[in-house]
Amino acid sequence: MSRPAPFSLRLTPDERTRLEAKAGSMPLASYIKSVVLADDAPKYRKRRQAPSAEQQLLAEVLARLGQTKHANNLNQIAKHLNQGTLVLDEELAADINAALADIAWMRTKLMEALGVQS
């Protein structure tokens, strides 16, 4: 079964802006169908909304966390501390300081996203 040919509708920029405002988060074609066809209009998923500032901050933190191996590295450090086999050289000290800086940054960003004053 072939699909019917698409229907085109030309709008002025003002008309389109007004329609988009009325449609809200709904795709424009779905909104037009819902108004014109009312109950017969097919139901479509809503248009994805732009992420909020909080969601963007959380995504940034998650991305940073995914790029690091801090959890594994800190676990290994704790293991060696508990065994008494930790040798603290310049490289390990630098890694620990870098991890602490990243964790402090993540804490700050999470608190911002949650609206908590530090």
Image: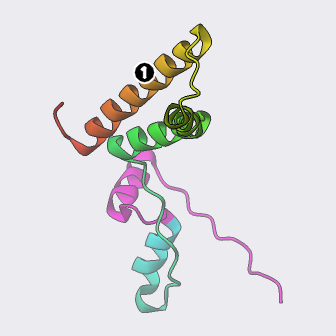
Q: Quadrant of residue 89?
A: top right
The picture places residue 40, in percent across and down from the top left corner, at 48, 91
How did the renderer colour the structure?
rainbow
Tell whether position 21 is magenta.
yes
Q: Quadrant of the N terminus?
A: bottom right
Judge from the rendering whether residue 21 lies leftward or rightward of residue 9; answer left or right.
left
Q: Nearer the viewer, residue 64 or 43?
A: 64
- Residue at 49% in and 25% down: 99
The picture places residue 84, in percent across and down from the top left corner, at 53, 30
Judge from the rendering whether residue 86 lies leftward or rightward of residue 111; answer left or right.
right
Q: Specify the segment rendered in magenta.
A: 1-28
The local secondary structure at tag 1 comes to helix
Q: Nearer the viewer, residue 75 or 115?
A: 75
Q: Can you name the residue that lies furthest to the front here?
A: 84
Q: Residues within 10 Å of mark 1 (few under 14, many from 20)?
A: few
- Residue at 61% in and 12% down: 91
Task: Identify residue for label 1.
Answer: 101
Q: Nearer the viewer, residue 118 or 80?
A: 80
The picture places residue 79, in percent across and down from the top left corner, at 55, 38
